């Protein structure tokens, strides 16, 4: 949403304008996977593996499709946030001579803080912390297979980090 106003006065061309943009994202995290094999591009009249999985992918010939749609009541399967930007400007174009003009102005832009809704994994927009939507904290990677967290830093310099679950 925005509006502009132009006012001509003598040798001046004044322009004023404001705008507001709201950006929103609602993403349902659904999983899909296409599998490609050598069978789709192999020569049926020759024995052995004559096909290529990359050729099957480039031709768009999947050998299988798997899809996962999370439970509709699950709150951890969505990313939902929005933020607004505001801007305004004032500008003057001054005709000094017939083929010479001077344009000057000022513009101000403001980007608001993102606001998230619900419980979700990822960046917590209200606290600035990274969240993991899990009932328990995952183990450290050195002692467990993924999904896991990296081991804590032994360095005493640098910034500290916190985790929440």
Image (cartoon, rainbow, N blue to C red):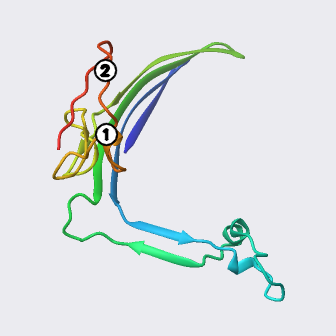
Q: Foreground: 152 or 24?
A: 152
User: Along the polypeptide, which appears first: circle 2 or circle 1?
Assistant: 1
Label 2–label 1 contact, CB within 8 A: no
Q: Position of residue 113 (x, y in %)?
A: 27, 34
Q: Where is residue 125 in the image (x, y as percent from the top left)?
A: 25, 38
Q: In which quarter of the image is residue 159?
A: top left
Nearer the observer, disc 2 or disc 1?
2
Residue that numbered label 2 is attached to:
154
* SS class, disc 1: strand
- The residue at 29%/29% (across/down) is 152
Residue that numbered label 1 is attached to:
84
- The residue at 42%/73% (across/down) is 67
* SS class, disc 2: loop
Q: Is residue 124 left or right of residue 22?
A: left
In this view, 52 is above or below 85: below
Which quadrant is the C terminus positioned in? Answer: top left
In this view, 90 is above or below 157: below
Q: Foreground: 52 or 121?
A: 52
């Amino acid at each position: 949403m925005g509006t502009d106003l132009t006012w001509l006065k003598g040798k001046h061309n004044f322009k004023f304008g404001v705008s507001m943009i709201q950006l929103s994202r609602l993403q349902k995290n659904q999983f899909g996977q296409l599998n490609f094999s050598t069978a789709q591009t192999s020569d049926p009249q020759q024995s052995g593996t004559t096909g290529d999985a990359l050729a099957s992918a480039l031709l768009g010939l999947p050998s299988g499709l798997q899809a996962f749609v999370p439970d509709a009541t699950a709150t951890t399967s969505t990313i939902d946030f929005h933020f607004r930007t505001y801007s305004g400007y004032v500008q003057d174009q001054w005709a000094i001579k017939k083929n010479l003009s001077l344009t000057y102005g000022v513009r101000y832009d403001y980007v608001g803080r993102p606001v998230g809704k619900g419980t979700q994994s990822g960046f917590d927009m209200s606290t600035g912390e990274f969240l993991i939507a899990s009932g328990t904290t995952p183990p450290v990677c050195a002692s467990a297979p993924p999904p896991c967290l990296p081991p804590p830093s032994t360095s005493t310099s640098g910034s500290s980090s916190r985790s929440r679950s």
